[in-house]
Image: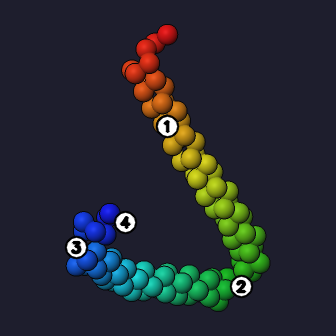
Amino acid sequence: MSFFHTTPLGRIINRLTKDTVDADKNLADFAAFFLRSLLQLVSTIALIGIVTPFALPALLPILLLFYFLYQYFQVTTLLIALSSAFLTLLAAGNVYHALHCGFF
């Protein structure tokens, strides 16, 4: 509670308002990028279906394979990041212990 007593209310409101404005600006850009990418994907698949219709049945297993590989690598990346953070904390704890408690 001491934070709110020492920090003027105007600074807090200004900070929250700035974050809201930034989120509003980025949301429009992200939505436009998402819609553009989605329409590009749909038009590419439609063009493949029109030009070479026999390729569409082979496209579904390939898309499923890419989706499962994406899920696998997302989880793997998260686990690597968590392991790295844990090892960094462990190493920092060992350095702290060595410096403050001695080597023996």
Front position among marks 2 and 3: 3
Q: Residue at x 63, y 62 (%)?
A: 70
* Mark 2 or mark 1, earlier in chain: 2
Q: Secondary structure at mark 2?
A: helix
Q: Nearer the viewer, mark 2 or mark 1?
A: 1
The disc, 1 or 3, on the residue closer to the chain's N-terminal end is: 3
- Circle nearer the viewer, 4 or 3: 4
Front in this rendered view, residue 70 or 90: 90
Q: Which residue is mark 3?
A: 8
What secondary structure is found at the residue carrying circle 3? loop
| Disc nearest the viewer among 1 and 3 | 3
Kindly identify the amino acid type of the residue bearing the numbered disc 2. Answer: Pro
Q: Is residue 63 above or below residue 74?
A: below
Q: In the image, what residue occupies the spot 67% across and 56% down?
A: 72
Give the x, y percent position of residue 44: 57, 83
Q: Earlier in the sequence, mark 4 or mark 3?
A: 4
Asked whether, in this view, residue 24 is left or right of residue 54, the answer is left
Q: Residue at x 67, y 67 (%)?
A: 67
Report crowding for label 4: few under 14, some 14 to 19, many 20 or more residues within 10 A (C-alpha). few
In the picture provided, is 43 more to the left or to the right than 14?
Answer: right
Nearest the viewer among 2 and 31 is: 2
Tell me the residue that label 4 is attached to: 1
Nearest to N terminus: mark 2 or mark 3: 3
Residue type (three-letter) at the residue carrying disc 3: Pro
Of the residues shown, which amino acid type is indicated by label 1?
A: Leu
Residue 21 seen:
yes
